[in-house]
Image: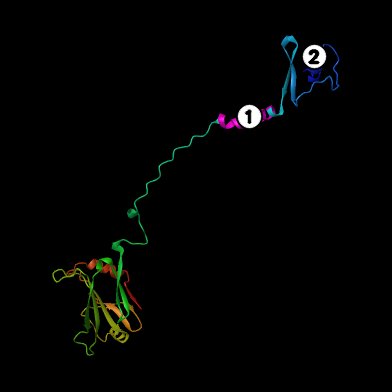
Amino acid sequence: MIDPRLIKRDRDFHANNGRPHSNTAEDQPERALTVEIGVVYLGDSQELLDIRITPAALLVVLFFPILAAPLLVGTPQRQPDSPAAPIPPQSAQTNSKHPAQGDETIKYVNTNYRFTFSLPGSWKGYSVVAERWEDTPQDEVRQSGPKIIIRHPQWTDENQRQDITIMVFTHAQWNSLQQGDFAVSAASIGPGEIGRNRKYVFAVPPRMIDSDNSYGWEEVVKIMQRSPLHVF
């Protein structure tokens, strides 16, 4: 490989018509600041090519690939927005905080004996019938007490639906009943306790469910399975 310094020296010799190169300021013309890349011969003509680049041109050469990269790669095409999933109407959305009408619960509140009784929403408009329970005639000590009947709103004389009957005993009456001192029905079993507070015991008759003659008895069975009576 030819040393570029020899090539430049040979070029200067030819440019001065064979005269030695002078290093004085008078012999050197005023030149702009350049960056010399190299000097090469062009074929057999022995002509020299002097490649020089200014600093500004050098910056363009260095930064051109960076500036041109986006053009060469291409601007990414914006993808069309995918259609959003349809939102159901507000009326069709399920709200767990508001139960369906079939799950609505209403309460019967008895302040005299201090208890409440929960009923399904289908019993809205129910009625309450106050009666009394009595012991059987053969008992020596006669006993009686309140009997509260909660009646379905669709109950009629022609279409008698199953009632909910609550018998109210004092604690003394209840203890005496459990000892067999008296009876409230001819059934072999006595009333079934469903709750008590400090003064009263609440029970249902042994034969309250009349599956043969009363319509809606299945619903009453489900109501009683939910422990609907609460004392206060």
> Which residue is depicted at the point 31% across and 67% down?
105
Give the residue pinned by disc 2: 15
Q: Nearer the viewer, residue 24 or 59?
A: 24
Q: Magenta part of the protein: which range? A: 57-72
Q: Nearer the viewer, residue 12 or 84?
A: 12
Residue 64: image tag: 1
Residue 56: image tag: none
Q: Amino acid at mark 2?
A: Ala
- Disc 1 is placed on an element classified as helix
Relative placement, left or right, of 211 versus 15 is left
Q: Nearer the viewer, residue 220 or 103?
A: 103
Is 45 a magenta residue? no
> Which residue is depicted at the point 57% across and 32% down?
70
Q: Nearer the viewer, residue 38 or 29?
A: 29
Relative placement, left or right, of 231 versus 80 is left
Q: Residue 148, image x and y in percent?
A: 24, 78
